[in-house]
Amino acid sequence: MRGCSFHADDVECRNTPPGTSDEMPNLSLRRIGLERLYMQMADVMVKEGWKEAGYEYVCIDDCWPSHQRDAQGRLQADPKRFPGGIKKLADYVHSKGLKLGIYADVGKNTCAGYPGSLGYYETDAQTFADWGVDLLKFDGCYMDRTLLGEGYINMSHALNKTGRSILYSCEWPLYEWPIRQPNYTAIRETCNHWRNFDDVFDSWSSVKSILDWTASHQDIIVPSAGPGGWNDPDMLVIGNFGLSHDQQESQMALWAIMAAPLLMSNDLRDICPRSKELLQNRRIIAISQDPLGKQGYRTLKVDSFEVWERPLSKNQLAIAILNKQEIGGPRGYVIGAVPGWKTCDPLCNVTQILPQYKEMGIQTPHSRLVVSVNPSGTALLTVTPISKLHWQDMSVKHKHPTVL
Ligand code: GAL
């Protein structure tokens, strides 16, 4: 699942220190109004190649509803922010060939204090279906944690009952971890993706903390991921202000390795060309969306390098080598030291995707191929095994196989 997410809370829900809100780059609600902002984002997604690259959802986050439900107990959009209502926005987004995501909460209130769905699961599910919503992000604030599972399961029944196909994005495990180890079998049966850990911020320390949490819980969470249900390490913050380009490449590479939903939180109307190119990189997106649907994991931690690997379809392997040394210059890493290098026996074809595309040719188990990785950057590669038979075939055809 890939999507573009533009978050209402990024615009105005967060507490902005007094006097600074007008300086918020390009995102000032006062200037354009939230409804138009979502429409503009949908326009850009079509015009600027995002849709073609596979990004298909425009997602609303917290702060979209009115503080009061209507006379029938239904949620209603804040009339100032969404004067035309959510149905009108959904129609617009659909007219562009895109899908609309919305946000609600399993408990009494959303995290920002708007009405939650507790006691209204069926009403809210039906309202979202009537509006033509295609994705529901269901948060877990203001809920008795011992009742989380029940709430998330009941909402999934309510969504199914509407008959509309609505992708169900949960935060169930994130809120359950502080009290016990979540039941990932039940979560996978209920949700299409699920947040496990803290909200991402626009900083390298935040991205690193997500990677660390994921690696230290990989034995528990990785087996639960697969077609239909994915771990969600939160949004891509590429194209904002807090990450260097190397760090942006690291986030993109590792989110692809983690089989994460690719949800962007950025301003697509004003994004630097390098970030755009990275987010639209077809080769990285192909790794992320590989049909085998296995989540990758950290396989090695040595000398401030982290190696992450993801098995891909057709026996291919994706390898990410992250240089966590935040001082000095580029450092070399011998790819043959990667645990999955056995894929290369007897031969393989290696392609580097990041930091720049490079065909590295046919390799053997003994090749001493070195990749150079910048501080806080990542080298991303794919390894395609070549069977002995195929090799013999090639040598007959070409007489001189290129073996290094
Ligand atoms: C958080 C949630 C965030 C965002 C926020 C909105 O709890 O994890 O992704 O939705 O609430 O208030």
Image (cartoon, rainbow, N blue to C red):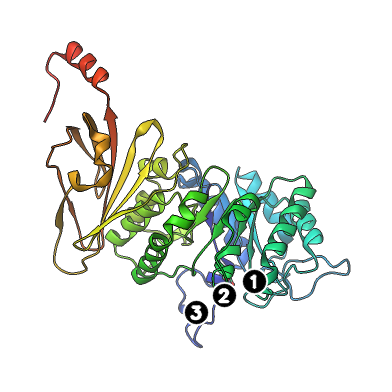
Q: Nearer the viewer, mark 2 or mark 3?
A: 2
Q: Classify residue 344 as left or right of residue 312.
A: left
Tell me how many marks there are: 3
Please name which of the two marks, 1 or 3, marks the residue nearer to the observer.
1
Mark 2 Cα-neighbour bin, 10 Å: few <14, some 14–19, many ≥20: some
Relative to 366, residue 74 above or below: below
The amino acid beneath tag 3 is: Asp
Crowding near pointer 1: few (<14 within 10 Å), some, many (20+)? many
The residue that label 2 is drawn on is 12
Q: Which of the two residues, 391 or 264, is positioned nearer the viewer here? A: 391
Queried on whether the Cβ of the residue with tag 3 lies below 8 angstroms from ligand 1, the answer reads no
Pick the front one: 92 or 131: 131
Measure the C-alpha gap from mark 2 to mark 3: 11 Å
Q: If you read the primary sequence from the N terminus, does the residue marked by circle 1 or circle 2 appear first?
A: 2
* C-alpha separation, residue under disc 1 versus residue under disc 3: 19 Å
Say if mark 1 contacts mark 2, CB within 8 Å.
Answer: yes
Amino acid type, label 2? Glu
Q: Picture coordinates of residue 218 (x, y %)?
A: 42, 57
**Secondary structure at numbered mark 1:** loop
Can I make out residue 131 in this image? no
Which element carries disc 3, helix, strand or loop? Answer: helix
Residue marked by disc 1: 63
Residue 84 on image: x %, y %: 73, 61
Task: Identify the mark nearer the N-term, 1 or 3.
Answer: 3
**Against 135, is 207 above or below?**
below
